């Protein structure tokens, strides 16, 4: 709608940003509106796509939106084929089996793929369309995650989740009538994913201040309006007020665009995502405690804010370096504990973050750097909300607000706080806390 168009106008034209890079939106058309499904064929034709189209959905999303899209395409005379995954008989995951089915069923003559669904369907289609060299259009059915505008596809291959390169959607058509009817656990998951942007932004600023990491203010600002709208009235999300659902889906779409602008997921993913990612991995390994991605991010966010809070209340002058030196773990000791903890996954993790296994000398330098930059960090992050404020927002949205409410064992929580930071090279508050011996 108008506000979103306005926000995206400079990006559409392309501009050289204060961060030193040129930003340009690669997604040609984004619309969030009511009564949108029936207009999809006409919108596709405006983009030069006359068909044939291949529609991908699951049983639920076919009912929610796929059927209406299909009949609109037929009415417009566009040849349509489709792949419908059966749910909930078998919980759909973006794995080898589901990908192979798409490769088998998409006709060679297909001009455009339509992903009618949320996370899994969109990831499957994004990856397949990219590999087939065909464009795809995303028709979100739930405001549940921030991957709609994403350029990459997280897939589960060999039982492990890995991110594969792909291309963003050519267009995103989010029908508000459909989104307002989405299952509530999906709406709260999307809200959780959006709330994680608070700590993601804080971590990014932290890394800019301490390590001079590339930072793009305008990509970070892109999400602000939507984030403010949704955090101001979480109950409105529970009540499915169209204005709030619109704020949520826009925030989630804009997160994906911010990621594209920054060239990595920094604007949308920090320590809260590392905890969520850790729990996701453990769910896969132990085959228990499955939750939507955003639900985990949501409960991880107050946890991370708690760590920020703890540090904000520290006196940097009173850091006991001699004490830290005495209990310091050498790189070899850290490597051993990572191997013990992660088992078969350890090799990959060790390769991801060698810069996090520090000698005492390196760590001492880090601590002195943190001390020197303390005031700058405090004033740059003065905007950060209290953990209780986020917990309250989750409650008002009728979401689980703590990992315990979600049913995660205390051991998973403790282990995540210790080990999750090794999953990514990305510097976060978890590293600061580890360096200062706070965790
Ligand atoms: Zn996320
Ligand atoms: Zn920029």
Image: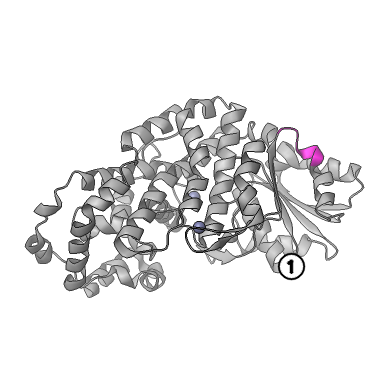
Residue 48 sits above or below residue 233 on the image: below
Residue 82 on image: x %, y %: 79, 52
Residue 165 on image: x %, y %: 59, 66
Q: Which residue is mark 1?
A: 133
How many marks are shown on the rendered structure?
Answer: 1
Secondary structure category for the residue under label 1: loop
Q: In the visual, does 72 lie left or right of 285? A: right
Residue 37 counted in the magenta span: yes
The colour mode here is one colour
Q: Quadrant of the N terminus?
A: top right
Q: In the visual, does 326 lie left or right of 250? A: left
Q: Residue at x 42, y 51 (%)?
A: 276
Let me know if residue 91 appears in the view. no
Q: Nearer the viewer, residue 80 or 15?
A: 15
Residue 418 sits above or below residue 141 on the image: below
Residue 265 on image: x %, y %: 48, 58
Residues in magenta, as a range: 34-39
Q: Residue at x 19, y 68 (%)?
A: 365
Residue 32 sits above or below residue 321 on the image: above
Residue 404 sits above or below residue 268 on the image: above
Q: Nearer the viewer, residue 68 or 411?
A: 68
Let me know if residue 50 appears in the view. yes
Residue 152 on image: x %, y %: 58, 61
Q: Looking at this rendering, what residue extends furthest in the right direction? A: 77
Q: Residues within 10 Å of mark 1 (few under 14, many from 20)?
A: few
Residue 129 counted in the magenta span: no
Q: Residue at x 65, y 43 (%)?
A: 5
């Amino acid at each position: 709608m108008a506000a979103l168009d306005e926000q995206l106008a400079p990006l559409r034209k392309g501009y050289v940003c204060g961060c030193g890079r040129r930003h340009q939106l690669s997604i040609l058309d984004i619309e969030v509106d009511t009564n949108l499904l029936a207009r999809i064929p006409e919108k596709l034709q405006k983009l030069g796509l006359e068909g044939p189209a291949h529609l991908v959905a699951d049983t639920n999303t076919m009912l929610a939106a796929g059927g209406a899209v299909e009949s609109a395409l037929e009415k417009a005379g566009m040849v349509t084929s489709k792949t419908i995954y059966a749910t909930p008989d078998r919980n759909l995951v973006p794995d080898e089996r589901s990908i192979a089915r798409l490769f088998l069923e998409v006709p060679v003559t297909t001009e455009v793929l339509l992903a009618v669904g949320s996370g899994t369907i969109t990831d499957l289609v994004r990856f397949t369309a990219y590999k087939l060299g065909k464009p795809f259009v995303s028709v979100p059915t739930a405001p549940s995650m921030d991957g709609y505008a994403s350029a990459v596809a997280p897939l589960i291959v060999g039982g492990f989740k890995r991110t594969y390169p792909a291309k963003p959607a050519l267009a995103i058509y989010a029908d508000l009538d459909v989104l307002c009817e989405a299952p509530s656990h999906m709406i709260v998951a999307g809200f959780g994913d959006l709330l994680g942007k608070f700590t993601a932004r804080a971590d990014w600023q932290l890394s800019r201040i301490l390590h001079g990491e590339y930072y793009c203010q305008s990509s970070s600002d892109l999400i602000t309006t939507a984030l403010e709208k949704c955090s101001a009235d979480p109950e409105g999300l529970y009540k499915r007020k169209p204005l709030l659902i619109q704020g949520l889906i826009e925030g989630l779409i804009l997160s994906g665009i911010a990621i594209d602008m920054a060239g990595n997921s920094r604007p949308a993913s920090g320590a809260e995502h590392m905890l969520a990612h850790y729990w996701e991995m453990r769910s896969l390994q132990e085959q228990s405690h499955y939750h939507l991605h955003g639900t985990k991010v949501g409960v991880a966010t107050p946890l991370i804010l708690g760590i920020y809070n703890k540090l904000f209340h520290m006196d940097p002058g009173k850091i006991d370096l001699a004490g830290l030196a005495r209990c310091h773990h050498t790189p070899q000791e850290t490597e051993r504990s990572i191997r013990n903890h992660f088992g078969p996954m350890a090799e990959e993790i060790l390769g991801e973050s060698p810069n996090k296994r520090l000698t005492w000398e390196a760590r001492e330098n880090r601590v002195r750097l943190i001390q020197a930059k303390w005031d700058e960090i405090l004033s740059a992050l003065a905007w950060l909300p209290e953990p209780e404020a986020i917990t309250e927002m989750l409650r008002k949205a009728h979401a689980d607000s703590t990992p315990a409410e979600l049913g995660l064992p205390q051991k998973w929580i403790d282990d995540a706080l210790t080990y999750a930071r090794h999953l990514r090279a990305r510097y976060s508050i978890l590293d600061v806390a580890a360096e200062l011996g706070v965790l």
